[in-house]
Image: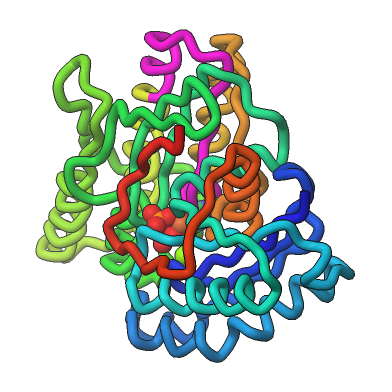
Amino acid sequence: VYILGIETSCDETAASVVKNGQTIVSNVVASQIKSQQRFGGVVPEIASRHHVEQITFVIEEALHEAKLSPSDLDAVAVTEGPGLVGALLIGINAAKAFAFANKLPIIGVHHIAGHIYANQLMQPMEFPLLALIVSGGHTELVLMNDHGSFELIGETRDDAAGEAYDKVARVLGLPYPGGPQIDRLAQESDEAVEFPRAWLEPDSYDFSFSGLKSAVINYKHNVEQRGGTVNDQAIAAGFQQSVVDVLTEKTVRAAEEFKVKQVIAAGGVAANKGLRNSLEKTFKEKNIPFYVPPIALCTDNAAMIAAAGTMMYLEGERGTLSMNGRPGMPLSSWK
Ligand code: ATP
Ligand code: MG
Ligand code: FE
């Protein structure tokens, strides 16, 4: 089964062909990071315009790299939501046109289901499975008892982890996106400022990062007001330690409570070296299988959309040509 995946929910224009939901045949990502950097973040109108300019080329390139023609494909999978509505619509309309012209079924994929299924491009999933989703807009623990079954057991009550990274980076004067920059500073630092950890109620699997973000801002301002020099590396290291400690502790506690066979991490912040190291080390000690995709499959890409779309295709899920962008689409089970 060959599925073409298309992803345009935020600032990456991406297309990919995946075989049997497991093997990447081609994977093309056109990033807009350079042009969004000038504005310190993603400007929706600019994102849409970039997608319009790139989408046809990106799809053609994905087929070219795969050495396949449209008639070799079984379906088109596209991100239906959540995301920026104007950005989503570019991918959805391209997918509809492609599907209509080539008489292929179309499948609408939830972006976060995509992030989760990026893992299936590396190894088969085993259930029950716990997914830690940490991205620009989401921080969630999701329990899966089977393919396409998603049970939310914890989520952020305010900022997403990636959002906190990007906001703290901006306070430190680092360019967008801030996550990789803070990660680098944190790795280089041998000192760390002590910041609070938001554990919330003892049995809660929810997260909160806005208090930590405020603590970083207050700390920096206090040092500056006293005329001291701010050690940005130590701030980055302290911030990252706080985020990583909370994410690791809650993920481990949930993995043990729900007696899962496999734990996976997904989303842009799963590219974080500090987090990867901490989760790998901790789950090794606990003897629970833990996996995280290579960095290029953690951040936005279309291979993950094709991978999730393949599972949906095999289980009979089909969308229609009246599909619309769903900016607030919930992660609901498809079976
Ligand atoms: P969502 O997936 O929730 O819709 P998104 O698609 O915008 O949001 P992703 O592209 O999955 O988010 O991830 C981008 C986020 O990941 C950004 O906030 C970025 O700063 C963060 N990020 C990327 N690399 C790292 C890293 N090494 N350390 C920490 N954060 C990182
Ligand atoms: Mg992105
Ligand atoms: Fe994403």
Residue at (38, 17) in percent of width and height: 254
Viewer-proximal residue, 73 or 64?
A: 73
Residue at the extreme front of the image, as rendered: 103
Whether residue 183 is visible, yes or no, is no
In the image, residue 315 above or below residue 51: above
In the image, residue 260 above or below residue 106: above
What's the magenta region?
251-271
Residue at (31, 68) in percent of width and height: 170
Across and down, in percent, residue 237 comes to: 40, 46
* Residue 235 belongs to magenta span: no
Q: How many marks?
A: 0
Across and down, in percent, residue 235 comes to: 33, 51
Across and down, in percent, residue 7 comes to: 54, 66
Across and down, in percent, residue 227 comes to: 16, 65
The part of the image, by quadrant, that contains residue 255 is: top left
Residue at (67, 59) in percent of width and height: 75
Residue at (57, 33) in percent of width and height: 277
Whether residue 81 is visible, yes or no, is yes
Left or right: residue 201 versus residue 49 is: left
* Residue 255 belongs to magenta span: yes
Q: How is the image coloured?
A: rainbow
The part of the image, by quadrant, that contains residue 168 is: bottom left
Left or right: residue 144 versus residue 102 is: left
